[in-house]
């Protein structure tokens, strides 16, 4: 049997467009003589469709297109399609339809629901009551859906793993397992999936086909990276990461395939993820062009380089907005970076508007030098960028990194103005890694940007480390607190200063009010600020 792995990039809610794409992939698979083509989880509606699932119009459009568009396209080819199903009582199921010759032959519903971090599937779906296999051309297919295979690899209080889906399906004697997924990326995720499936297959000794969604939707980035593990538990087929792809695999040949070398998931994966995150956010919401405020610092440099890779240099506008506190070095660095990237570069000083504020609030042009004056500079810049956005149609990309966002080291309605925060889940120390990766072949980001001491340049001689602990230590503490959910006691026991640890944690907790007003950020770690981390804004918990 020849199986096509159809790794598609659906758009949430673009039901018509998704069906068109699905039919195109079915036709490609047919043309390449596949017997069966497999699509990712919920590919007809895109993942995650969230509360659109509560809307009858949405569900009806999906059903109508399955009947009118997909069924007629399935003559002489089997299709496994991830979609939503509504029963006669109105209950919803996250399902895989097995369709052949114009008929829905079998329906596999998802049994286990991820209900942790960014996932909220119990809100929508009812679980499958029984496990099934479907016979097709003499082969028994054990189809399951994403979380169904994660037992023993996710340890979350909210998921009921009392059913072992693979174990129950295996009792029905499948010849092959097929998992359809919408599995969002974080650094290390692909190695984890491969290790998990290889290990499980060593026990069951049948081939495993894993088909994952690709592309970004809101803050989630799906890497695709679909693959096939043969009956010996070796990964022998691999699809592309971060791109649509289709591969036809002859199951009879699998045993003869050579095992592929281990994937090295390095910083290039984060870079590629962020590029797709920016590209899809813009494309799927109708933006062609982006604008970035280029300070001459490392954060805006990295964001600008990512935007160029995502949208093309002709679609990125870099704006330098120097103030009386901007160093010559920063201004020159911003210009050189823009030249290296080949983007349009505008210089719009903020001095005249800053002076007007000083004269309104201080009575003359004298400087008090307080926080209000620092922040107004960031706010003038934010307004300039939003003016350009309104007038010329660019999306404004914000440049805050995870360390700053954690500590609230950013200005509301200032540098936080904008619609998408590409590096909001990238700790400052990883921003440097990204910069070095961007420079891997030639110096795009001037070395002086990478080597300079981080500064907001909102007052004379300001340095980030006047207000924050050194980034290396800060990032270590933040990773333990946010990603690993460790207690202050555990972190202190690892040798960090008690007062520092408590101050950092208290600060993170206190500035939730800022993050609630921040642009959505692209997720690339196990725990990002965003939908997967729900904290109260108003509280009084202190260490
Ligand atoms: N609990 C709470 N709930 C809701 N709102 C609360 C609040 N506490 C304060 N606020 C409000 O927030 C305001 C304070 O926030 P905000 O105006 O943003 O200002 P704030 O956090 O006081 O200052 C911004 C800090 O970020 C630094 N910065 C700015 C820009 C760029 C960078 C960089 O390096 O990238 C760093 C800057 O040097 C300064 O230390 C208060 O005046 C109040 O209106
Ligand atoms: N002179 C400037 N010209 C243009 N944009 C600026 C300027 N200063 C700040 N910005 C914008 O505000 C953001 C926050 O800047 P700031 O320099 O305060 O902090 P940062 O976190 O050190 O960022 P960066 O590393 O990019 O400098 C910058 O990334 C940039 O987008
Ligand atoms: N859609 C899902 O069920 C995703 C959950 C799964 N554990 C993953 O991230 O791969």
Image: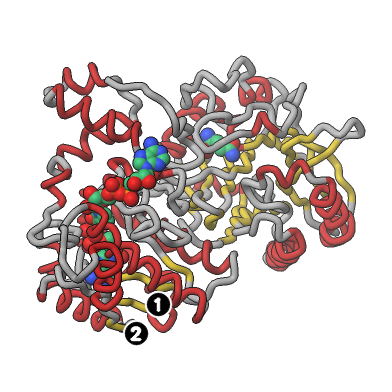
Viewer-proximal residue among 431 and 323: 323
Q: Which residue is mark 2?
A: 344
Q: Earlier in the sequence, mark 1 or mark 2?
A: 1
* Quarter occupied by residue 492: top left
Verify CB contact (< 8 Å) between mark 1 and mark 2. yes
**Percent coordinates x, y for residue 100 in the rendering:** 84, 50
CA separation in Å, label 1 and label 2: 7 Å
Q: Determine which of the numbered discs, if any, sits on residue 48 in the image.
A: none
Q: Secondary structure at mark 2?
A: strand
**Percent coordinates x, y for residue 28 in the rendering:** 69, 67
Q: Is residue 339 left or right of residue 151?
A: left
| Colour scheme | secondary structure
Viewer-proximal residue among 440 and 469: 469
Q: Is residue 177 left or right of residue 69?
A: left
Viewer-proximal residue among 180 and 230: 180
* Quarter occupied by residue 438: bottom left
> Is 12 placed above or below 492 here?
below
Ligand 3's quadrant is: top right
Work out whether residue 234 can be spotted: yes
Q: Determine which of the numbered discs, if any, sits on residue 316 in the image.
A: 1
**Percent coordinates x, y for residue 376 in the rendering:** 30, 61
Q: Secondary structure at mark 1?
A: strand
Q: Residue furthest left?
A: 461
Which residue is at a point 35% across and 60% down the rendered structure image?
Answer: 414
Q: Residue furthest front?
A: 363
Viewer-proximal residue among 197 and 118: 118
Q: Is residue 182 left or right of residue 335?
A: right
């Amino acid at each position: 049997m020849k199986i096509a792995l159809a790794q598609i990039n659906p758009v949430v809610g673009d039901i018509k467009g998704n069906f068109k794409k699905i039919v195109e992939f079915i036709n490609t698979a047919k043309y390449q003589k596949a017997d069966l083509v497999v699509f990712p989880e919920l590919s007809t509606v895109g993942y995650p469709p969230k509360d659109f699932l509560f809307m009858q119009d949405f569900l009806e459009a999906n059903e109508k297109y399955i009947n009118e568009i997909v069924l007629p396209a399935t003559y002489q080819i089997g299709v496994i399609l991830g979609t939503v199903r509504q029963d006669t009582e109105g209950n919803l199921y996250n399902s895989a339809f097995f369709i052949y010759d114009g008929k829905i032959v079998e329906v596999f519903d998802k049994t286990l629901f991820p209900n942790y971090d960014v996932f909220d599937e119990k809100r929508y779906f009812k679980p499958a009551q029984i496990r099934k296999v479907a016979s097709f051309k003499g082969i028994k297919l054990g189809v399951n859906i994403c979380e169904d295979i994660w037992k023993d690899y996710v340890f979350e209080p909210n998921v009921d793993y009392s059913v072992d889906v693979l174990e129950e399906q295996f009792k029905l004697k499948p010849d092959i397992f097929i998992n359809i997924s919408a599995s969002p990326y974080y650094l290390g995720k692909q190695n984890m999936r491969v290790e998990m499936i290889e290990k499980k297959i060593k026990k069951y000794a049948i081939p495993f086909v894993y088909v994952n969604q690709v592309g970004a939707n809101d803050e989630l980035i799906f890497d695709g990276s679909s693959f096939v593990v043969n009956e010996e538990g070796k990964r022998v087929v691999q699809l592309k990461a971060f791109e649509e792809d289709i591969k036809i695999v002859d199951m009879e040949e699998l045993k003869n395939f050579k095992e592929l070398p281990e994937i090295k998931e390095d910083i290039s994966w984060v870079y590629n993820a962020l590029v797709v995150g920016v590209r899809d956010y813009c494309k799927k919401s109708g933006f062609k062009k982006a604008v970035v405020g280029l300070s001459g610092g490392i954060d805006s440099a990295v964001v600008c380089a990512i935007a160029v890779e995502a949208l093309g240099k002709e679609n990125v506008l870099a704006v330098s907005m120097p103030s009386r506190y901007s160093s010559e070095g920063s201004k020159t660095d911003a210009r050189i970076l823009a030249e290296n990237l080949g983007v349009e570069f505008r210089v719009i000083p903020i001095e005249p508007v800053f002076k007007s504020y000083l004269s309104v609030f201080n009575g003359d042009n004298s400087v008090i030098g307080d926080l209000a004056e620092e922040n107004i500079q960031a706010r003038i810049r934010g307004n300039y960028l939003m003016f350009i956005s309104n007038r010329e149609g660019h999306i404004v990309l914000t440049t805050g990194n995870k360390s700053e966002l954690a500590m609230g080291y950013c200005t509301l309605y200032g540098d936080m103005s904008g619609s998408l925060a590409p590096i909001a889940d990238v700790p400052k120390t990883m921003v440097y890694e990204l910069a070095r990766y961007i420079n891997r072949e030639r110096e795009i980001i001037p070395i002086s940007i990478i080597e300079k001491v981080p500064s907001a340049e909102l007052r004379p001689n300001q340095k980030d480390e006047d207000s924050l602990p050194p980034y290396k230590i800060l990032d270590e503490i933040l990773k333990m607190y946010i990603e690993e959910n460790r207690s202050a006691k555990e972190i202190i026991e690892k040798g960090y200063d008690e007062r520092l640890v408590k101050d950092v944690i208290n600060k993170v907790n206190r500035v939730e009010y800022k993050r609630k007003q921040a642009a959505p950020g692209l997720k690339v770690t196990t725990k990002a600020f965003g939908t997967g981390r729900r904290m109260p804004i108003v509280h009084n918990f202190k260490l």
